[in-house]
Image (spheres, rainbow, N blue to C red):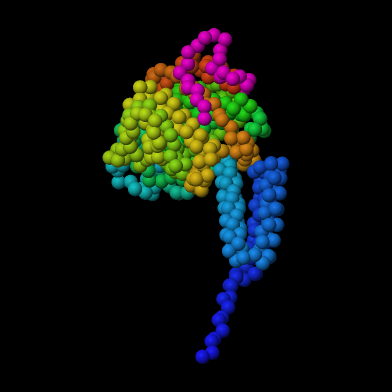
Amino acid sequence: MEKKPKKKKVKRHLNPIFYKILTFLLIVVTVVTFSYITIKEIFSLYSLIPFMIAAIVFIIIIAIVMNSKLRRWVKNLFSLLVIIVIAVESLFAIYGTQAFALLNKIKDTGIRVETYGVYVNAGSSYSDIKDLTNKTITYLHMENDSQIQTALDKLDKDTNLEYTLDSKDNLEDLIKYFSDGKTDAIFMSRSYEDIVKEEYPEEHSKLKLIYSFDIINYVKTETSGKDVTKDTFTVYISGIDTSGKVGSKARTDVNILLTINPKTHQILMINTPRDYYVPLKTSGKNDKLTHSGIYGIEESIGTLENYYETNIDYYVRINFTSFIKIVNSLGGIDVEVSKSFCEQDSKRDFDNQICLKKGKQKLNGEQALAYARHRKTLSNGDMTRGENQMEILKAIMNKAMSPAIIKGYSGLINALSGNIITNMSSETMTAFAKKQLSKNTEWTFTSLSAEGESQTKPCYSLGNARASVVVPDEASIERIKNALKNIYNDKSDLLYTEETTTTSSTTTKR
């Protein structure tokens, strides 16, 4: 019987065109990525040269391998390597684009929104603005409030309402007038609503908002011309604990100054309690620092500049309720909790409290926000809360300036979007980030808090009605001013004074 010849096994290779397309894609993606890095100046051209040479050599090797007659498994192995390189370069370009898009998005455009509202008694039958036809509406007319007439004109134009107009010169009289039933409704900026809630909680519970509108203004935002990679600069962190727009006028619940010296690698953190009793920039009248925010962030900046006799180069205004997303995107933060406590959750629900025990631990977003808010059981109340907020901010900065940020990069971008505005240009932020990435600088943190004594004093924004405030301790203010001078003069010891002093500050290294 005749034997059938054995069939030779045919080695199946991927179509040669596949290897050519893959090589072409590698070249295109590599060129685009390096062009992007160069144009955006993420790294200096000098530092990029070795990587560019390596990339060219790698592409040449790939091109030779892909067009050779090497074994199939060798080509497939190199193909897998090329796919991984293309994926990494593509992700870098995508996330880099997102980062620069965010930097442009959080840039303060100068748009200022103030919301006005018409309030009635919650137990009344009024539910619509038209129900106030031929009724009395009383508004808050504060000294130097040039916008109130614009707001009243808009109310008339938008509603065509016939009503009797009355006014009160201070918030206390307005709320008492309303509570006594002497007016059918009150009209005021909604930025005052939180003040009413804090100072007159019983009357606040009777308020019902039935109509509101926005008035939009534009202010010219000024930026510093400093080189943040070389010059000492100060950033004002203004935190609002509200769900409203971050650009809206609102009380500033967090007031922290960060003075950064790139030469000595020092960061001075200064906390000023929200209830600190200081003269406002525009009026010169004394008020709680937190109330300066209802006149705009520019008022808060000017007030702090005058008080500490320093210049504030940049500001960052952040909605502190976004802490949950920010902290979670970083995988939590390590914080030394100063005291065991329980606090309401982010929805302000006491039935679902966040409880923390004293000691060093990793906090998630909900826990970090609870720690930033809590003050009721603290010995020094708002002053200690401010110190806790500085600890949280320091922990966030440490995480954000470390390689750990890569893991939560996308989530961090989403968390910041819409929850932060700044007058710092994208070029300035990029320059500082580039230096940190290239040098991986170890920073020394020094924390100082303005101290004082709780008293009852008249407040300008309340029409000189009295409220609980923190009267400054002049010795603590002098320590802060001295530390500011030292960091700007490149001193290594920020707490140094010619006279021996004791301080309640903390100095730590990252």
Helix, strand or loop for the magenta stretch, by majority: loop
Q: Is residue 240 visible?
A: yes
Residue drawn at (45%, 49%) of the image:
159
- Left or right of 366 in this view: 426: right
Residue drawn at (60%, 38%) of the image:
437
Q: Is residue 287 visible?
A: no
Q: Tell me where residue 65 appears, x and y as whole percent.
A: 66, 61
Choose top left, top right, bottom left or bottom right for residue 69.
Answer: bottom right
Question: What count of labels does the image hold?
Answer: 0
Q: Tell me where residue 391 appears, x and y as whole percent.
A: 45, 29
View extreme (top): residue? 499
Compared to residue 249, the image places residue 271 above or below, namely above
Residue drawn at (61%, 19%) of the image:
491
Residue 499 lies in magenta, yes or no?
Answer: yes
143 or 268: nearer the viewer: 268
Q: Tell me where residue 462 appears, x and y as whole percent.
A: 42, 27
Residue drawn at (36%, 34%) of the image:
197
Choose top left, top right, bottom left or bottom right for residue 90.
Answer: bottom right
Q: Tell me where residue 144 appears, x and y as whole percent.
A: 52, 30
View extreme (front): residue? 1
307 or 448: nearer the viewer: 448
- Left or right of 51 in this view: 396: left
Compared to residue 415, the image places residue 225 above or below, namely above
Choose top left, top right, bottom left or bottom right for residue 367.
Answer: top left
467 or 389: nearer the viewer: 389
Q: Residues in magenta?
A: 488-510
Residue 21 lies in magenta, yes or no?
Answer: no
